[in-house]
Amino acid sequence: MRAHEIPPGILPTRRSLYYGGAWHEPASGLYADTINPAYDEAITQAPVAGADDVDAAVRAAQAAFPAWASLPPARRADYLRRAAAVLREHALPLAQLDSLNNGNPVSALLNDAGFAADGLEYFAGLAAEVKGETIPMGDGNLNYTVREPMGVIARIVAYNHPLMFAALRIAAPLAAGNTVVVKAPDQAPLSIIRLAELVGDIFPPGVVNFLCGGRECGDAMSRHPLVRKVTLIGGVPTGKAVMETAARDLKPVLLELGGKNALIAYPDADVDKLVQGIIGGMNFTWSGQSCGSTSRVFLHESIHDRVLEAVARLLPERHKPGIPIDPATTMGALVSRAQLQKVEGFVASALEEGARLVSGGKRPADPALAQGFFFEPTVFADVQPHMRLAREEVFGPILSVFKWRDEDALFEQVNDVDFGLTGSIWTRDLDTAHRAARRMTTGYVWINNTSQHFLGAPFGGVKQSGIGREECFEELLEFTYTKNVNIKLG
């Protein structure tokens, strides 16, 4: 890491695991380099938690659970609001830290701490809404339900927005009365260590706990007998592994997994706005590393050529890879060499299978970027449904463009993948918009928009894109169970 490029004061001062209200060295004594993707150089070392560390953290969370669950909801809400205020105060250095560690542009990451703070405040406001019902039973019986917190919740978060995911995803379980153990992504753990430094002491010891580690850490969290629910933001293979492990103890899971999301453009779409939506929906800012990216674009044949030409012309102007920590950068680096090689493999297979490369398709020529994991924003046309590029999630900056004519055949292709996270529909006709939204098998649909999340609107997928919903009231209820109480009256 080029030391002169690290803004002063942004690195965490600790290099330890945080649980039970204190800092702990990993039981194994193991540390691993964490990399700056812009240069493929180590920034510092991060602790690697193993099964013993997970056990200690979970037991600390379990010990804290009864007192936290018994707090009045308004008190729990106060803690969440205090944490939100701290996030807002440190938004810039947290964005800089994530940018150094995961390769995303600092200018775009500036919103992450604010959105996480919004989420903490949103769920603080819902803390008193964890309510039951009364059920008529006739004379002689009073029957009612209560919502109870589950206990220790394991939260495993992804590398594309580590700070935001970790801070936002503690909100709902804490508001409902649970305690939480968070696992940082092994590719980008630094902002979560810093988060522990900033908000750990706000909460009573053991209520929030933060670990760093790899597969062993995540597996130990999933299988620990005191963990009552496991949640993951990540890829499908990891989600399947978590679910398989959790199933041994019949643990419920909440999974936000991958996507192979479709953007559908009808003949009457506003072409100028559509072009902007196509580029924005692919999340080139994050080098395409977003599960919600609309990476499959279906253009009606009547507008296909001019829209494709406009996208190819505008894309290099909007997004050119650059050093992530530079505020002028609009597209960063991929998170690792393995991810870069994966993207290059998709380009090779697309060319071999007959897709037409429209733009990009290689690493940038700029010598200043030669050491890092940069890749040009890439567009392929003439993509066919059987191609690997059409069916598998790349998690990289590759946009696939399809041409369609018949609406029935269109939706057959759109829905004929294993994923169902998001979708986007572009039309000026209200009937068309509603009809298309009904026919799209996804958990979330934008109409004449892409990529935005709105607190209160359920986000989550179907099929292999996940289980459960987040960022809404349903997420709060995900961390409770219903208890029925029947009273025989005299």
Image: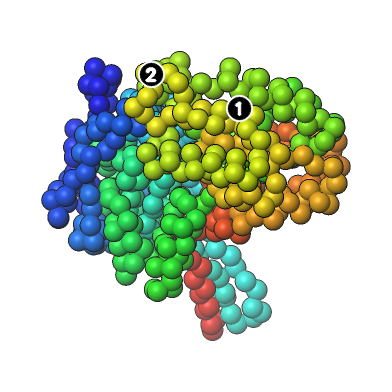
Front residue of 280 and 247 = 280
Q: Position of residue 411 (x, y in %)?
A: 77, 51
Label 1 SS? strand
Q: Quadrant of residue 335?
A: top left
* Disc 2 residue crowd, few under 14, some 14–19, many 20+, Cα 10 Å: few
Identify the residue position indicated by label 2 in the image.
Answer: 367
Q: Quadrant of residue 368?
A: top left
Residue beneath the point at 37% across and 57% down:
154
Amino acid type at image mark 2: Pro
The Cα–Cα distance between marks 2 and 1, rounded to whole angstroms, is 20 Å
Label 2 SS? helix
Front residue of 29 and 338 = 338
Q: How is the image coloured?
A: rainbow
Q: Position of residue 120 (x, y in %)?
A: 44, 40
Q: Position of residue 225 (x, y in %)?
A: 32, 70
Q: Is residue 70 above or below residue 46?
A: below
Q: Is residue 392 left or right of residue 199?
A: right
Front residue of 477 and 4 = 4
Identify the residue position indicated by label 1 in the image.
Answer: 359
Residue beneath the point at 25% across and 22% down:
2
- Which badge, 2 or 1, comes first in the chain's sequence? 1
Q: Quadrant of residue 51?
A: bottom left
Circle on res. 332 = none
Amino acid type at image mark 1: Ser
